[in-house]
């Protein structure tokens, strides 16, 4: 199932940084000044500037969607199987842009950045941004790069929510929208899982109310538990059974609290490796961004009305075993789009890999994206 | 849906304590000496001693299944809606016994008890017990009380696992077995949720490797997160939606980390009230007991073989929206029982209340238990 990292990858990449002198009026009321967005690009923008693809990252993603920073890197970008020459989003045809969202920990202005008011990192004082704020900042970035209309805006999970928001806020700047494993808003259960993760982080004594940078510590224990909770909800019960079952590390029960079942070892590892790569304040902030997303709210809960001004072509994809954003949630989006007489392709992909499917090179999934992207017209 | 606490309850009850001089050889290899079991009884044992019902408690339960300790008590026992005069388990007919399991925190020998070897509480050194160990200790209790055969052994969730183990280990001492919202063993996902809860507790700095009693502290933060995780898995997505939806405490988003959504308030409250009533070492231990339960393991995974010696009549119940122990898990038990040509009644009860349903006075559920219990023959 997993592809090898081979010649047809985008190769060595680097992150660019765009500085914005202007201000960004955030939904929370705060005005952000002098902010920066880190982003990567793959492929070349054509002369007509009509082959650009915006990739929106999910909760724990960043701008590093494809390629490697050095030959020695063990891991490529998070969507390396999707983006590259000859891959579903073919960089021989498209110019791909992937920004790190505001509030992120990939270098864009966020909790780790200097707060001009205090000359210390923002930490917990970085304003909670919304998906709408992200779209605004991405639109500013598009203008800087010189892109007036995206050929495709695409993303999975929280990334899919950004896609939807783009088609609402800038209907004429998105020719094609690919919304993967997303939902028009979180369910109560989704919010509850986020809240437990937040409690785990915020109750860690090393969180220090979010000002842990100054203490040179990290709320490791809380962040680890938060990641374990999140990760578990990305996987289906079936794939857990297939991959780990009730296999015991030592072949027998130990009657103790060290790792006994393989699944315990796997989850602990997931938690530990996350601590080294992700910022606790960003995690808190982005779970809130997820909780708040609800474009229908301003229309009395009517999603059809919220999508009334959309003008893009849509590909909506879901995965059969995804219980975090189940196919029925994707269908809510499809229904509302169809009620607006929009062009919608929808497919539920058979996969036992749960919500994580959107990151994985599943044959049917990649073939559908390939076929869809192939028929997207661009100038020669 | 909720019944009022009315005249036909068992009234004021008290906990009894049974001391066992003998030894109990535990599955883990440890021999427990001089242990105690706390239990409650409701109703009267008849002359023929054939009207006794054993109630087995679940993960966070104890011996206080019905009634109140004083008139002033706000809450009655955890299964007060099930047990009492005129209730599904009618105490005018039956003599009900509910013990607190070994390792529990209701007064039976467990982590809070004195370790004779150190003259300090056992804490984390209390041996991890198995469902088989519990059945052994319950059987010793039955002998002390003078019960040679139970009219019914019943329980939900981890309680249902004890019922199943009873019918395997003492087939002729159980006339009727009522197995509710149970599974023949945990799924990988179930184990994973338990492991995350354990990590939350064990990584709390106030856990002190389990020796927190001596420090006069409680790993509150970890225990709270553990309970929030557990509790969330007991509820269905649907009931969360119905009860809380995306309702906001203050009617609008605050862009902060205080309680915003009603579900957050509810979960925090669940976590906090648990901290006051439950012991962290017991919680750790009992989640391990759950993980280990797998009667088919000694039969090459063949549940039918594991149940080959069973000789009881069975009532197996599941709840439609239970995703912790879903109906399909109950059906695994039913299939194995039927393959042994046993008498099995099975019903999946429609309920949107999730795993928690087994504790709640759902009309169809109570009517089925009433009808089943009514036809259980006892001497006059």
Image: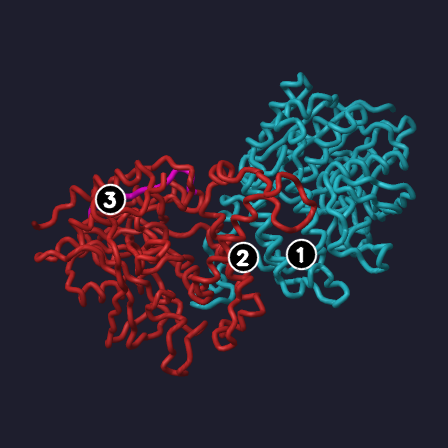
Chain colours: A cyan, B red
The answer to whether A339 is drawn above or below residue B355 in the figure is: above
* Residue at image location 49% in from the left, 44% down from the top: A238
Image side of residue B323 versus residue A358, left or right:
left
Give the residue at mark 3. B88
Q: Say few, some or many: other residues with alpha carbon within 10 Å of mark 1 (under 14 / 14 to 19 / 20 or more).
A: some
Give the residue at mark 1. A274
SS class, disc 3 = loop
Q: Please state the chain letter of the residue tagged with numbered disc 3 in the rendered image.
A: B
* CA distance separating discs 2 and 3: 35 Å
Q: Please state the chain letter of the residue tagged with numbered disc 1 in the rendered image.
A: A
Asked whether A374 or B173 is in front, the reply is B173
Image side of residue B138 versus residue A284, left or right:
left
Give the residue at mark 2. B225
**Of callouts 2 and 3, the N-terminal one:** 3
Q: Which picture quadrant has residue B374?
A: top left
SS class, disc 2 = helix
């Amino acid at each position: 199932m997993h592809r090898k990292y081979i010649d047809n990858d985008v190769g060595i990449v680097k992150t660019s940084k765009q500085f914005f002198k202007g201000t960004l009026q955030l939904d929370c009321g705060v005005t952000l000044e002098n902010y920066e967005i880190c982003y990567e690009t793959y492929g070349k923008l054509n002369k007509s500037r009509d082959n650009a693809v915006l990739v929106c990252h999910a909760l724990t993603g960043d701008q590093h969607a494809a390629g490697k920073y050095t030959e020695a890197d063990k891991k490529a970008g998070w969507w390396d199987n999707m983006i590259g020459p000859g891959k579903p989003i073919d960089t021989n045809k498209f110019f791909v842009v992937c920004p790190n969202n505001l509030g992120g920990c990939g270098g864009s202005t966020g909790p780790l950045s200097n707060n001009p008011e205090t000359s210390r990192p923002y930490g917990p004082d970085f304003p909670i941004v919304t998906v709408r704020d992200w779209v605004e900042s991405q639109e500013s970035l598009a203008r800087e790069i010189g892109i007036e209309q995206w050929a495709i805006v695409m993303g999975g999970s929280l990334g899919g929510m950004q896609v939807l928001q783009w088609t609402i806020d800038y209907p004429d700047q998105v020719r094609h929208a690919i919304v993967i494993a997303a939902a028009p808003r979180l369910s109560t259960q989704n919010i509850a899982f986020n809240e437990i993760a937040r409690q785990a982080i915020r109750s860690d004594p090393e969180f220090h109310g979010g000002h842990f940078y100054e203490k040179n510590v990290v709320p490791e224990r809380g962040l680890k538990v938060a990641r374990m909770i999140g990760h578990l909800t990305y996987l289906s019960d079936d794939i857990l059974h297939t991959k780990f079952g009730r296999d015991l590390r030592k072949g027998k029960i130990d009657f103790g609290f060290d790792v006994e079942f393989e699944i315990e070892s796997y989850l602990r590892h997931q938690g530990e490796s996350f601590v080294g790569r992700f910022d606790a304040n960003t995690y808190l902030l982005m779970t809130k961004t997820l909780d708040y997303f609800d474009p229908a709210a301003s229309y009395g809960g009517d999603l059809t009305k919220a999508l009334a001004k959309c003008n893009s072509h849509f590909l909506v994809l879901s995965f059969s075993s995804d219980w975090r954003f189940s196919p029925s949630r994707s269908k809510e989006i499809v229904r509302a789009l169809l009620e607006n007489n929009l062009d919608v392709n929808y497919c539920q992909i058979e996969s036992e890999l749960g919500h994580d499917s959107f990151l994985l090179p599943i044959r049917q999934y990649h073939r559908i994206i390939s076929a869809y992207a192939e028929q997207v017209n661009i100038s020669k």
